[in-house]
């Protein structure tokens, strides 16, 4: 096979890694849109340099080396995305939020990741985990994702970074220690695996209860220390009383909403549509990502950027009065 044929085969093979590279860049950057851009830049760089791929490492390792460089370049400014609970303490549910913050401040949701498949990957696609990763220095972040999520060996990571195995192992240990400390500081409900069937049933019960605005049923579904946060607002709440105060106070306009099921970050999620004041249908209001521990809901993150997120998640631009969305969560 000639050089042209080899480089063509390498370029074709690179496209097969687009999906997993997007997951890697999303964990690195905390933004799905930025991850897609980073992967496109990775593939462009790889295609341009395909004739220089010498086969001393696997094509996959070569692609990840380029993707890591692209992400590290993007993170060079020191910008770090977060969730509201990473920036301040919880607030009272009965008070309205302050004006919204810049959308670039927040960790965003990632479409897809079937919950059944996600059950085998642990917490690596969860919003809280992606947000926690943002507290790591970029090279430590890359090392931890490559080792603990993607299964690269210490030698592969060392070669990817151009460092020693000892240096790669040291970075991994520091990253693990930082994440463990952040878990202790979060002081939230302890995560326990949820059976896929249990999560599906809980998600359906949640959608029904929210649509009916049945506060008693919602109270039963929520963990006592459950959280509700509202990007791009910095406001977030912890505990059933404050979540209920929010829903029956500042958010009372959500009464009568309809929820269309989807999937985000390996968890059941819903496009929330609030009723129009004139009763002619429903308008997009929020993308709700619902997280579970055991048989309780532990977190609800309601992203308000519906103009960008609803098309990304394949959600309709509006609902008519007679639309009856089915339950797929």
Image: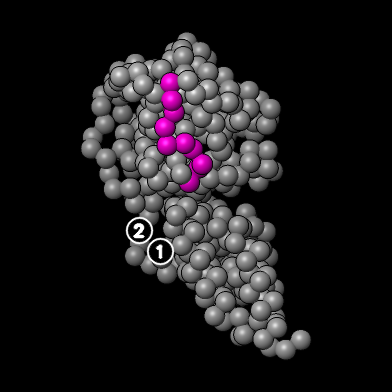
| Residue depicted at x 54% and y 26% | 325
Q: Determine whether, in the image, residue 321 is placed left or right of residue 115.
A: left
> Residue 44 location in percent, x, y?
52, 73
| Residue depicted at x 40% and y 46% | 308
For label 2, the crowd category at 10 Å Cα-Cα, with few meaning under 14, some 14 to 19 and many 20 or more, is few
Magenta stretch prevailing secondary structure = loop
Q: Quadrant of the N terminus?
A: bottom right
Disc number placed over residue 90 in the picture, else none: none
Residue 11 is one of the magenta-drawn residues: no
Using the image as rendered, state which of residue 126 and residue 314 is in the foreground.
Answer: 314
| Residue depicted at x 70% and y 83% | 5
Does residue 290 appear anywhere in the picture? no
Q: Secondary structure at mark 1?
A: loop
> Residue 262 location in percent, x, y?
55, 35
Reply above or below: 135 against 114.
below
The stretch of residues the image draws in magenta is: 312-321
Q: How is the image coloured?
A: one colour
Residue 320 is one of the magenta-drawn residues: yes
> Residue 172 location in percent, x, y?
57, 60
Does residue 252 appear anywhere in the picture? yes
- Mark 2 vs mark 1, CA separation in Å: 6 Å
Q: Which residue in the protein does label 2 denote? A: 79
In the displayed image of the protein, which residue is found farthest to the left?
99
> Residue 75 location in percent, x, y?
40, 63
Q: Which residue in the protein does label 1 denote? A: 75
């Amino acid at each position: 096979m000639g050089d042209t044929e080899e480089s063509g085969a390498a370029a074709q093979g690179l496209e097969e890694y687009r999906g997993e590279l997007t997951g890697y860049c999303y964990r690195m950057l905390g933004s799905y849109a930025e991850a897609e851009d980073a992967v496109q830049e990775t593939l462009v760089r790889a295609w341009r340099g395909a004739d220089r791929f010498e086969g001393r490492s696997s094509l996959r390792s070569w692609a990840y080396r380029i993707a890591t460089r692209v992400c590290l370049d993007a993170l060079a400014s020191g910008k770090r995305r977060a969730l509201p609970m990473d920036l301040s303490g919880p607030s009272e549910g009965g008070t309205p939020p302050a004006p919204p913050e810049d959308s670039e401040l927040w960790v965003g949701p990632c479409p897809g990741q079937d919950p059944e498949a996600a059950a085998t990957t642990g917490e690596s696609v969860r919003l809280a985990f992606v947000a926690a990763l943002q507290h790591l220095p970029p090279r430590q972040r890359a090392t931890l994702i490559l080792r603990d999520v993607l299964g690269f060996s210490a030698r592969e990571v060392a070669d990817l970074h151009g460092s020693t195995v000892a240096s790669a192992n040291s970075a991994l240990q520091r990253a693990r220690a930082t994440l463990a400390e952040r878990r202790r500081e979060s002081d939230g409900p302890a995560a326990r695996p949820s059976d896929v069937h249990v999560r599906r049933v809980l998600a359906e019960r949640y959608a029904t209860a929210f649509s009916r605005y049945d506060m008693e049923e919602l109270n039963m579904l929520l963990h006592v220390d459950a959280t509700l946060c509202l990007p791009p607002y910095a406001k977030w709440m912890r505990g059933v009383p404050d979540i209920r105060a929010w829903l029956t106070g500042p958010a009372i306009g959500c009464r009568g909403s309809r929820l269309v099921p989807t999937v985000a970050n390996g968890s059941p999620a819903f496009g929330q549509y609030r009723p129009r004041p004139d009763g002619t249908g429903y308008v997009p209001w929020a993308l709700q990502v619902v997280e579970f521990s055991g048989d309780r809901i532990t977190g609800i993150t309601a992203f308000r950027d519906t103009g960008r997120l609803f098309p990304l998640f394949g959600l309709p631009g509006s609902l008519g009065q007679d639309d009856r969305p089915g339950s797929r969560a």
